[in-house]
């Protein structure tokens, strides 16, 4: 008895508070297990299940944070009194079973069709390294997740965090996992990445930073044309007028091609007229096509040699 009193007296107020809060988390988990049992045995209450799922998500996060604080405060006490893995396993098992109840017992719609399911989510993960990809990401996310009225805000928040990594994820990771954090997360991301000036700058920088072509292969020339057209179209969508930038962009892009392509372009150009960017792209596409045809002809000649076919089957008088 004395030992227990002595032990209790040595526990600091912070440690006592953390243990009490962790005990509350365990109590919430026990209540969730009882709730699940009642739902399995009785009638389905979808609203209550969704509320319980939101609560469980918060309980799991709180338990992890409190356990970490207790571990930092008293490592021995944290390892002895609490099993984080067991708590997490129980929490995830309850969550999975509650979601399974919603899925398997979903009522049939008036028209006889089953409830709407989420489509396959082919949303690219946004890492924040390229600002120009944010608008595409957020539009896809809005169309598939945000506009889905069947999803609760906290579920949308989970999906949002799933499709983020790096800086964008760290930007919202500190917010509590609750439904109220979802609109705040969208606001933070919008303030950071929906920046028109930075997006325009990134498109222009991409044109400036395109690597110089050392060999005028058809694939290299086509890639230059394709990338340039994409960035210019994006700039036009953002309200810029790249069609008036020909005399600025032409010298820049001419420095990206190999010397033979550059020389061929100048030799074909009508010097009395100002060149246009579209004419330059057309020239590159024509040159790429010429390379491809030449390569096919060369491959066919080599193939014929391997089969030991005569190089010229035409008669001498055919010319």
Image (tube, grey):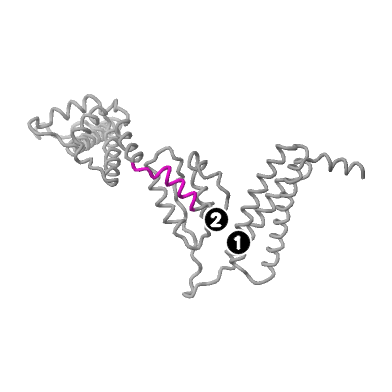
Left or right of residue 178: residue 227: left
The dot on residue 173 is: none
Residue 8, picture quadrant: top right
Residue drawn at (84%, 41%), measured in percent from left and top? 9
Q: Secondary structure at mark 2?
A: loop
Residue 187 image position (x, y, % from top left):
45, 49
1 or 2: tag closer to the N-terminus: 1
User: Which region is colored magenta?
Assistant: 183-196
Q: Secondary structure at mark 1?
A: helix
| Residue occupying image coordinates x 38% and y 47% | 135
Which image quarter holds the C terminus? Answer: top left
In the rendered image, the residue lying farthest to the left is 272
Q: Residues within 10 Å of mark 2 (few under 14, many from 20)?
A: some
Where is residue 111 shown, x and y percent of the image?
Answer: 46, 75
* For residue 205, side relative to residue 99 (left or right): left
Front-most of residues 104 and 303: 104
Marker count (numbered): 2
Label 1 to label 2: alpha-carbon separation = 10 Å
Q: Name which residue lies at 46% across and 46% down.
A: 188
The residue to which callout 2 is attached is 179
Give how far across and how far down residue 28 sits, in percent: 70, 56
User: Is residue 2 placed above or below 295 in the rendered structure?
Assistant: below
Residue nearest the viewer, comparing 271 with 13: 13
Q: Main secondary structure of the magenta part?
A: helix
**What residue is pinned by disc 1?**
51
Q: Nearer the viewer, residue 306 or 144?
A: 144
Residue 193: say if magenta.
yes
Question: For this view, does 273 lie left or right of residue 248?
Answer: left
User: Crowding at label 1, few (<14), some or many (≥20) Cα neighbours within 10 Å?
Assistant: few
Q: Front-most of 188 and 230?
A: 188
Assess whether residue 182 is covered by the magenta stretch. Answer: no
């Amino acid at each position: 008895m004395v030992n227990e009193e002595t032990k209790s007296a040595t526990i600091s107020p912070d440690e006592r508070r953390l243990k009490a809060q962790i005990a509350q988390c365990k109590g919430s988990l026990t209540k969730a297990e009882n709730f699940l049992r009642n739902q399995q045995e009785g009638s389905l209450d979808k609203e209550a299940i969704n509320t319980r799922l939101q609560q469980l998500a918060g309980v799991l996060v709180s338990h992890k944070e409190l356990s970490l604080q207790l571990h930092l405060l008293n490592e021995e006490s944290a390892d002895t009194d609490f099993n984080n893995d067991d708590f997490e396993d129980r929490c995830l098992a309850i969550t999975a079973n509650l979601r399974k109840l919603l899925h398997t017992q979903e009522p049939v719609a008036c028209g006889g069709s089953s409830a709407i399911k989420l489509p396959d989510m082919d949303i690219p993960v946004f890492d924040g390294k390229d600002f120009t990809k944010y608008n595409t990401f957020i539009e896809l996310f809005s169309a598939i997740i945000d506009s889905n009225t069947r999803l609760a805000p906290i579920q949308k928040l989970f999906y949002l965090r799933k499709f983020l990594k790096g800086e964008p994820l760290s930007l919202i990771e500190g917010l509590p996992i609750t439904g109220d954090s979802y609109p705040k997360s969208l606001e933070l991301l919008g303030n950071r990445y929906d920046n028109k000036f930075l997006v325009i700058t990134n498109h222009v920088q991409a044109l400036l930073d395109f690597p110089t072509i050392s060999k005028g292969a058809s694939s290299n020339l086509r890639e230059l044309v394709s990338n340039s057209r994409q960035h210019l179209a994006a700039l036009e969508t953002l309200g810029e007028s790249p069609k008036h930038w020909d005399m600025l962009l032409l010298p820049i892009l001419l420095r990206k091609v190999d010397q033979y392509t550059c020389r061929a372009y100048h030799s074909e150009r009508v010097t009395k007229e100002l060149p246009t960017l579209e004419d330059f792209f057309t020239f590159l596409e024509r040159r790429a096509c010429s390379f491809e045809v030449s390569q096919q002809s060369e491959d066919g000649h080599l193939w014929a040699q391997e089969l030991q076919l005569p190089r010229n089957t035409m008669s001498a008088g055919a010319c």
